[in-house]
Image: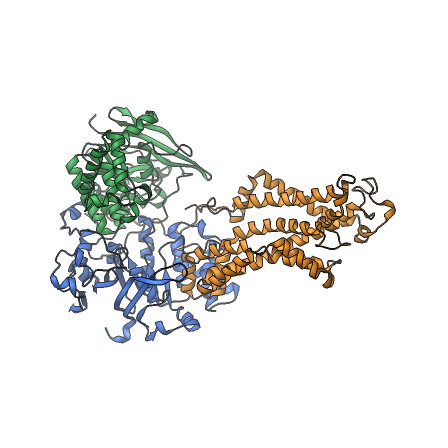
């Protein structure tokens, strides 16, 4: 893949949340290292999956990437421009091309706004269409695009079901004709029978408009279906990144192996025949990560070096990156 | 063995199955359950009608005509509420006085709401040092006693301000002072509530979504967050009207509020002080009107508070 | 009658502002000793309400059990006086829930809470209860049990809390453990731990388990037999292998086809199920799944099919034979 095909470059991204104490004067006593040195590229037109369990930092990575949180360190190059240095109006202008779909279809829409106003907000903010009538037409177009009835523009979010609200969120994200969409667990809050609807919609839109997705999820089965490449995160760092089938069929990192073996399969014979790697213990806190390799306390193949040195992020096969001493 | 699934039902564009009640309809339904609140609305409407429509039957000039020969007359056919210490007709004074009292209530409430919401919104939204400064200021204001301040400012400024002409009536400068001072000393509670709501609402995902779209802070504060915190503002505004009416009555009764000849329900009580037993019609009528108005507003406020309670208005999934 | 628990024609309603919600509409099933029954369905299908009704934990009003029997150890649980239910709950039938944080009292140590259950139900003294509690904590895999005995719920992670719940549930060696979406809120590696733990404990104690979930993968792992619910009805019931490999109801079939698999390469689009699950308030006559069903025939609009048992023991409520697409 040539570099002109890279849309987003993330280098050394860090996001720490300070822990403060004190009544009158707040002093920092520690930090939650939610994202601790993360680097990856996203190619135009692809879906990059970012997976991991709770506390791994995938949502924070997504939000820091699009500057909803200001990074503690690192760079995010979008089409060559460093977003971390953009401020104010200039950053707001960039947001036309970069949009986000949120996890909670109930919370991400303003309950007091009609869906026409919700979907039309990007058009207003970026002054794409100012005339009321033209804006209404565009909103109706967008509703049809996502499979909703265009005559419902004057309704409120609470009148729609979860799956429909999620579609409204998608319509809103598309209003400004973005190139890049961060999908932050877009189907986790939906019923199982609705998830396929939304996933199919996202795939269709990607084909139609050549969109690039960063798909953040914890549902590994769904990620296998929708993503081209997958990055696995654990406690603020990426431990493995490769093409989708490579990661799923030939995982290299012990955490990835354990994670994949833990995912339930809707097939009793397959799931019971599997070799499970059951990890001991819980995920440690991001405010006090283990020294050396962050996974070492739970790793089934832990060695001496793992307790001390941070593993290097290496390309062990073309396009397949892993951070592990034992690989 | 994979079983092929036949074509799904023709791709109907997803429809909404049933319409739901709008927010206002829901609120009204809940409000109606409070009998006292509904009674409050009815009686408030009647009182307002009394103050406004009464002008069809009498004039302000009439209410100010003094005629000491008929002073302190009990209610009669010509003067249904009797006459006061200088022979003015009490009924017409209560009508025009009502207008002033209600107007003071409304405008003081407006001042209170504007200041309270602005301060609360900015403190809650921006946080940090702006929040600290504004909240310390708010706390300082809490410590300023309203009535003594009103008394002092009332005495100092009332005679110095020029009269105001509004709606074809002339108001003495003291009315302005009262309205503004009451408003400027009652906003603190509302500011705290609005700030608290802003603190929690700004973390909601639809606000994050607005940031993500690129919306600026101003439209987020007033377009997104504020409409979601209308409930406490409405309740506070409603009760603020009652509070302002009482405060005005308080200071006018003490003689340092609105100056005669402009009548308010409060300063009519001032004239009645010495005649509590001998001429009860001097204080009964304005007194009852004050009590009725304030009670009605308080009941309405209670009803609104419950009707707007977000926990009862859970959106159905 | 060899089953441990038998539910017959259970019907439960809720009176709400918007109308009467028919949450459970004639659910029947049997649970055998030592076996695991999976109850699968999406939100609103009535799976939780069914089991809460069995435990008599539904608030009346607004809920109401309008019909049905729940036979356990020769008694109908629905007709028992409340005081007798106290003896059954916790001791004979235990239930654990999705969010352990709300099931555990935040101001009491977890040790205290487990011991309390033991003292109340088994009538043993505090000293003995303490020892048994430590044993239980170790059994569910909580290390350093004697120290953690004194900890409060907020000092545990989600997975650990769920283990505490399991310890509490098993403390009195119940005959049946009902688990209502116990791993839904947990990470997948922790979920795997809890599933393994449950299987191990079930083998050890020989209790029957009812596992409620919306996750067809988890059900495939743990259940011996499975019930699929939709809109308050049981639409399919069969042995676990049968139900996945020989699916007979269009809903179950569509659901399975709409799920991606972690162990298979992507082939084609996920099957779409149009529409959304109904709200059970004003249900039209006929099959509740019809608006979303690809197999619908005329009969489906007129009559709601009953759950019929086929010769091989597989139960299905459908007018159509999904292998041929034709009316049965």
Which sits in the foreground, C58 or A266? C58
The residue most toward the right is B69
- Residue B44 position within the rendered picture, expressed as x and y whole percent measured from the top left: 65, 45
- Residue B308 position within the rendered picture, expressed as x and y whole percent measured from the top left: 52, 47
- Residue C325 position within the rendered picture, expressed as x and y whole percent measured from the top left: 27, 43
Which sits in the foreground, A148 or C182? C182
> Could you say which quadrant of the image residue C41 lies in?
top left
Quadrant assignment for the N terminus of chain A: bottom left
Quadrant assignment for the C terminus of chain A: bottom left
Give the vertical position of C223 relative to A219 (above or below).
above
Q: Is C244 left or right of B136, judged from the image as shown? A: left
Which sits in the foreground, A258 or C324? A258
> Could you say which quadrant of the image residue A5 lies in?
bottom left
Give the vertical position of B192 relative to B69 (above or below).
below
Residue at position x 35%, y 56% in the image: A103
Instruction: Please name the color used to draw chain C.
Output: green
Instruction: Please name the color used to draw chain B.
Output: orange
- Residue B157 visible in this rendered orientation of the protein: yes
- Residue B5 visible in this rendered orientation of the protein: no
Q: Is A9 left or right of C144, judged from the image as shown? A: right
Q: Is B138 left or right of C110, judged from the image as shown? A: right
Chosen colour scheme? by chain
- Residue A300 position within the rendered picture, expressed as x and y whole percent measured from the top left: 13, 55
The number of numbered discs placed on residues in the rendered structure image is 0
Q: Is C119 left or right of B241, judged from the image as shown? A: left
Instruction: Please name the color used to draw chain A.
Output: blue
């Amino acid at each position: 893949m040539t570099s002109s095909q890279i849309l987003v470059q993330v280098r050394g991204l860090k996001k720490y949340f300070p822990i403060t104490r004190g009544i009158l004067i707040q002093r920092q006593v520690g930090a939650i290292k939610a994202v601790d040195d993360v680097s990856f590229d996203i190619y135009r037109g692809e879906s990059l999956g970012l997976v991991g369990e709770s506390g791994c930092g995938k949502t924070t990575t997504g939000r820091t990437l699009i500057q909803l949180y200001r990074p503690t360190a690192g760079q995010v190059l979008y089409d060559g421009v460093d977003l971390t240095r953009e401020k104010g109006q200039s950053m707001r202008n960039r947001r036309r091309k970069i949009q986000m779909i949120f996890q909670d279809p109930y919370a991400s829409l303003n309950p007091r706004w009609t869906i026409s106003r919700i979907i039309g907000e990007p058009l207003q903010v970026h002054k794409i269409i100012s005339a009321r009538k033209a804006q209404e037409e565009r909103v109706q177009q967008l509703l049809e695009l996502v499979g909703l009835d265009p005559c419902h523009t004057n309704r409120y979010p609470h009148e729609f079901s979860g799956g429909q609200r999620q579609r409204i969120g998608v319509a809103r994200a598309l209003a400004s004709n973005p190139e890049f969409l961060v999908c932050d667990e877009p189907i986790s809050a939906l019923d199982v029978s609705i998830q396929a609807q939304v996933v199919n919609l996202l795939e269709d839109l990607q084909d139609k408009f050549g969109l690039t997705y960063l798909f953040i999820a914890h549902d590994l089965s769904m990620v296998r279906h929708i993503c081209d490449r997958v990055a696995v995160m654990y406690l603020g760092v990426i431990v493995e990144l490769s093409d989708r089938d490579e990661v799923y069929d030939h995982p290299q990192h012990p955490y990835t192996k354990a994670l994949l073996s833990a995912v339930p399969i809707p097939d009793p014979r397959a799931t019971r025949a599997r070799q499970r790697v059951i990890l001991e213990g819980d995920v440690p806190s991001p405010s006090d990560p283990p020294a050396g390799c962050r996974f070492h306390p739970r790793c089934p193949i832990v060695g001496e070096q793992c307790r001390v040195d941070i593993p290097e992020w290496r390309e062990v096969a073309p396009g397949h990156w892993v951070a592990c001493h034992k690989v | 063995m994979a079983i092929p699934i036949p074509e799904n039902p023709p791709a109907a564009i997803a429809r909404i199955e049933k319409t739901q009640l709008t927010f206002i309809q829901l609120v009204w339904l809940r409000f109606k359950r409070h009998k006292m609140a509904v009674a409050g609305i009815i009686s408030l409407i009647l009182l307002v009608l009394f103050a406004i429509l009464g002008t069809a039957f009498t004039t302000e000039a009439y209410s100010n005509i003094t005629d000491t020969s008929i002073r302190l007359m009990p209610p009669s056919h010509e003067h249904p509420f009797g006459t006061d210490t200088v022979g003015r007709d009490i009924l017409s004074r209560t009508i025009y006085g009502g207008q002033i009292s209600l107007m003071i209530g409304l405008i003081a409430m407006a001042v209170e709401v504007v200041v309270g919401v602005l301060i609360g919104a900015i403190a809650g939204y921006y946080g940090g040092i702006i929040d600290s400064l504004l909240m310390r200021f708010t706390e300082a204001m809490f410590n300023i006693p309203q009535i003594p301040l009103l008394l002092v400012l009332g005495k100092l400024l009332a005679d110095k301000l020029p009269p105001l002409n509004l709606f074809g009536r002339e108001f003495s400068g003291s009315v302005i002072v009262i309205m503004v001072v009451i408003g400027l000393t009652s906003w603190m509670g509302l500011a705290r509530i609005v700030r608290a709501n802003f603190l929690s609402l700004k973390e909601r995902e639809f606000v994050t979504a607005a940031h993500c779209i690129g919306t600026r802070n101003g439209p987020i504060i007033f377009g997104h967050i504020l409409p979601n915190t209308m409930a406490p503002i409405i309740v506070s505004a409603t009760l603020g009207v009652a509070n302002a009416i009482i405060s005005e009555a308080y200071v006018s009764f003490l003689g340092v509020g609105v100056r005669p000849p402009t009548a308010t329900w409060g300063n009519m009580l001032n004239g009645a002080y010495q005649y509590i037993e001998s001429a009860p019609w001097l204080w009964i009528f304005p007194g009852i009107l004050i009590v009725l108005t304030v009670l009605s507003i308080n009941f309405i406020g209670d009803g609104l508070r419950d009707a707007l309670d977000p926990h009862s208005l859970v959106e159905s999934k | 009658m060899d089953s441990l628990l038998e539910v017959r024609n259970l019907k439960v309603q809720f009176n709400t502002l918007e109308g009467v919600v028919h949450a459970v509409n004639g659910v029947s099933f049997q649970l055998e000793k030592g076996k695991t029954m999976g109850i699968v369905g999406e939100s609103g299908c009535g799976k939780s309400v069914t089991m809460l009704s069995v435990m008599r934990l539904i608030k009346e009003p607004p809920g109401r059990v309008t019909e049905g029997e729940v036979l356990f150890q020769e008694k109908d649980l629905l007709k028992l006086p409340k005081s007798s239910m106290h003896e059954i709950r916790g001791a004979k039938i235990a239930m654990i829930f999705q969010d352990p944080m709300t099931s555990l009292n935040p101001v009491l140590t977890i040790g205290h809470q487990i011991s309390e259950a033991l003292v109340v139900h088994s009538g043993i003294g505090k000293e003995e209860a303490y020892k048994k509690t430590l044993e239980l904590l170790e059994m569910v895999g909580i290390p350093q049990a004697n120290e953690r005995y004194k900890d409060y719920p907020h000092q545990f992670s989600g997975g650990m809390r769920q283990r505490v719940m399991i310890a509490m549930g098993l403390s009195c060696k119940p005959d049946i453990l009902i688990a209502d979406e116990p791993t839904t809120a947990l990470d997948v590696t922790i979920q795997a731990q809890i599933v393994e733990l449950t299987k191990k404990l079930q083998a050890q104690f020989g209790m029957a388990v009812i596992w409620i979930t919306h996750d067809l993968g988890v059900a495939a792992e743990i259940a011996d037999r499975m019930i699929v619910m939709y809109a308050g009805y049981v639409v399919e019931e069969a042995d676990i292998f049968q139900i996945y490999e020989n699916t007979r109801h269009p809903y179950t079939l569509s659901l399975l086809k709409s799920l991606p698999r972690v162990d298979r390469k992507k082939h084609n689009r996920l099957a779409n199920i149009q529409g959304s699950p109904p709200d059970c308030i004003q249900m039209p006559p006929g099959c509740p799944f019809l608006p979303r069903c690809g197999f619908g025939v005329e009969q489906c609009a007129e009559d709601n099919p009953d759950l019929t048992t086929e010769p091989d023991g597989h139960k299905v409520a459908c007018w159509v034979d999904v292998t041929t697409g034709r009316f049965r």
